[in-house]
Image (cartoon, rainbow, N blue to C red):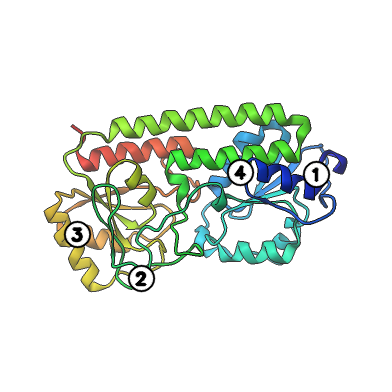
Amino acid sequence: MNVRRLIPATALTAAVALGATALTACSGTAGAAGTADGKLHVTASFYPLQFLAEQIGGDHVKVDTLTKPGVEPHDLEITPKQTGQLSESDVVLYLKSLQPAVDKAIAQSGVKNIVDAATLTKLEAHGTSGEEDHDHAAEGHDHAAEGHGHSHGEGGEDPHVWLDPAKYAEIAKGFGAALEKADPGHAADYKKNTDDLVAELGALDTEFKDGLKNTASRTFITTHSAFGYLAERYGLDQEGISGVDPESEPSPARMKELQAVAKKDNVTTVFFETLASDKTARTLAQDTGLRTDVLDPLEGITDKSQGADYFEVMRSNLKNLQKALGTK
């Protein structure tokens, strides 16, 4: 791609702002020259945004990710080389406050064209610190580990928006509009790819609504509170062993509380995930006589993932939830 194909950053900011997206740019022309094969160079902060960029960009983009497979996104450390590479990107797609190292690297890199996914949809608080340990979402309560919630967003918001297909679709629309403005020569293709992705996410949303409509229990226990948006969307109760920070340790009181919740709400399964430790989940399951299974927050794809991409893993999550909740 030639640098002339990128519109000036100031114009890009104004155009995308009109489309209610979140492209931040500085004055002047875009500083990146694209890739040698003429593709738009997009850097995504972690897997859900990488997948989205690949689906929407198609053959016209080269997508790199800062978070390699198998790395827990919250623990990411950015190398000086990666920071330097950011400045060579045509567009950077990230989720502000999810990964502090990424926020810092973006600020240091001087990259001009930035899309913050957190501004493309509404973030909410789910089991974060500063609440009374009970976040009443949908028709139930979303408990955080007392004293162990982690405030990712500027207002303590839960960043795990990609686990709600409807919110993920909102991010897709915003990023699609950003690509259309960044690379107007391929705007029609970006628009079509965005529409196709949004339609597929709509179908996934319907699968979850229908698949979780009638269950014996509405409560699930999981390692950390990553599924607040999903629970709220489909009328479930998320009980996180820890808060939205997967590294926080639950207190003995919280573990005792979860044992009572499991008995009261007919919980059958304690969920753990692929990129974080399953120690506390297995301990709770042993203490309560419950099963364990995987509920994947989709922060990365590895050989342990129950699927090769976002849609496959989300459908595996649906099947595991149906089994745990007792679909009727």
The 10 Å Cα crowd at callout 1, few under 14, some 14 to 19, many 20 or more, is many
Residues at marks 4 and 1 touching, judged by CB atoms closer than 8 Å: no
Query: Which is in the foreground here, disc 3 or disc 1?
Result: 1
Residues at marks 3 and 1 touching, judged by CB atoms closer than 8 Å: no
Q: The residue tagged with tag 1: helix, strand or loop? A: loop
Q: The residue tagged with tag 4: helix, strand or loop? A: loop
Query: Which is in the foreground here, disc 3 or disc 2?
Result: 2
Query: Which is in the foreground here, disc 2 or disc 4?
Result: 4
The 10 Å Cα crowd at callout 4, few under 14, some 14 to 19, many 20 or more, is some
Query: Which is in the foreground here, disc 4 or disc 1?
Result: 4
Give the side of residue 310 with respect to residue 139, left or right.
Answer: right
The answer, for residue 282, to whether it is visible in the render is: yes
When asked about the image quadrant of residue 58, the answer is top right
Residue 73 rendering spot, x and y as whole percentages:
52, 58
Quadrant showing the C terminus: top left
Given residues 10 and 58, the one toward you in this image is 10
Give the side of residue 220 with respect to residue 79, left or right.
Answer: left
Q: What is the C-alpha distance between the residues marked 2 and 4?
A: 34 Å
Q: What is the C-alpha distance between the residues marked 3 and 1?
A: 53 Å
Residue at which label 4 appears? 20
Residues at marks 2 and 1 touching, judged by CB atoms closer than 8 Å: no
Given residues 18 and 175, the one toward you in this image is 18
The 10 Å Cα crowd at callout 2, few under 14, some 14 to 19, many 20 or more, is many
Using the image, determine if residue 61 lies above or below residue 199: below
Q: Amino acid at mark 1?
A: Gly
State the mark number for residue 148.
2
Residue at which label 1 appears? 34
The answer to which of marks 3 and 2 sits earlier in the sequence is 2
